[in-house]
């Protein structure tokens, strides 16, 4: 998973092709903070809890069915096999 404020379209697609979930969210965290991340089974949202600071951010996710399949398979190379 990569968490950022925003992604360029091509970068987001490349992450998905490699099986990496791109999440657009603003999360306040320091280097040593412990994060707990939960993705909804239907890939509709992600919950990011900063256990160190006691804060939670819920970010919506928006993927096409093909993108969800790529993410579940771990990327384009795994889907081809």
Image (cartoon, rainbow, N blue to C red):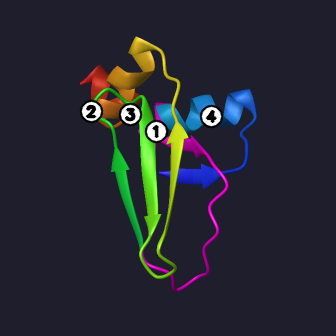
**Where 27 sits versus 9, above or below?**
below
Structural distance between the alpha carbons of marks 4 and 1: 10 Å
Q: Nearer the viewer, residue 25 or 14?
A: 25
For the C terminus, which image quadrant?
A: top left
Our reading of the magenta stretch's main secondary structure is loop
- Secondary structure type for disc 3: loop
**Where 4 sits versus 54, above or below?**
above
Mark 4 or 3: in front is 4
Residue beneath disc 4: 12
Residue at the (39%, 13%) spot, across then down: 65
Q: Earlier in the sequence, mark 3 or mark 2?
A: 2
For the residue carrying disc 4, how many other residues have a C-alpha within 10 Å: few (<14), some (14-19), or many (20+)?
Answer: some
Residue beneath disc 2: 41
Mark 3 or 2: in front is 2
Which quadrant would residue 78 be assigned to in this image? top left
Which quadrant would residue 29 be assigned to in this image? bottom right
Total count of labels: 4
Residue beneath disc 3: 75
**Where 56 sits versus 10, above or below?**
below
Mark 4 or 1: in front is 4
Pointer 1 with pointer 3, Cβ within 8 A: yes
Structural distance between the alpha carbons of marks 3 and 2: 17 Å
Question: Residue 29: which numbered mark, if any?
Answer: none
What's the magenta region?
Answer: 17-34
Pointer 3 with pointer 2, Cβ within 8 A: no
Residue beneath disc 1: 18
For the residue carrying disc 2, how many other residues have a C-alpha within 10 Å: few (<14), some (14-19), or many (20+)?
Answer: few
């Amino acid at each position: 998973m990569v968490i950022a404020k925003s992604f360029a379209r091509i970068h987001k697609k490349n992450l998905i092709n490699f099986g990496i979930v791109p999440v657009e969210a603003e999360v306040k965290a320091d280097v040593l903070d412990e994060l707990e991340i939960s993705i909804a089974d239907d890939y509709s949202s992600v919950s990011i809890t900063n256990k160190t600071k006691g804060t939670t951010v819920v970010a919506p996710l928006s993927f096409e069915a093909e993108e969800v399949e790529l993410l579940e398979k771990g990327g384009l190379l795994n889907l081809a096999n």
